[in-house]
Amino acid sequence: MEVILIKDVEKVGRAGTVVQVKEGFARNFLFAHNLAKPATAASLKKLEQAKQVRLAQSAKVKEESIQIKKRLSQLSLTIAAITCGEEKLYGSINAHEISEALKEEGFIIDKSNIELAEPIKSLGIYEVPVKLHPQVTATVKLWVVKTSTK
């Protein structure tokens, strides 16, 4: 029996896919727990329309991400940090601080989208990748400079 999954079902399939299952499993488990619905001509047509809408929305989000990438690529952030010695930072610069610096420049980017391999622990110029979309990653130039203390 063919069914359309409404929600992800482990070892069966992901939501929005059409899968072949045994009739008893569909009737007693999937339909009973509202995890699937029968694959009729009308429901398949509705599924295809929903897919088209999702593709259009995804394309729009990707295009917006590309526009943000262009703006981010031209951006150069500067973060002043306290040092202990000449080059080594007292502490480190992490994704949260970079996210806050981006927020000050007008970009609201979650810290989980900033892909730092490890926290920055010394002065210098860094290229920081920022994931905007599964297929779009921008690179921001980050200057870590010594703070002026008296």
Image (spheres, rainbow, N blue to C red):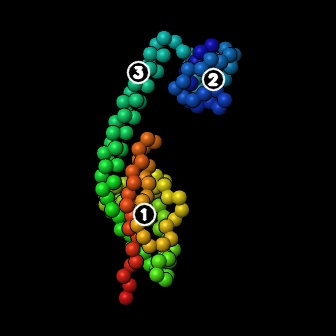
Residue 59 image position (x, y, % from top left): 37, 34
Pick the residue in front: 20 or 31: 20
Q: Is mark 1 on a helix, strand or loop?
A: strand
Q: In this view, does 84 lie above or below 105?
A: below
Q: Which of marks 2 and 3 is in front?
A: 3
Give the label, 1 or 2, closer to the camera: 1
- Residue 30 shows which numbered tag? 2
Picture coordinates of residue 78 (x, y %)?
36, 68
Mark 1 and mark 2 lie on one chain; the one further toward the N terminus is 2
Q: Which amino acid does label 1 sit on?
A: Tyr
Please give the label number shown on residue 126: 1
Amino acid identity at mark 3: Gln
Q: How crowded is mark 3: few (under 14 residues within 10 Å), some or many (20 or more)?
A: few
Residue 110 showing in the rendered view: no
Q: Quadrant of the C terminus?
A: bottom left
Residue 24 in the image: above or below residue 133: above
- Farthest residue to the top: give it: 41
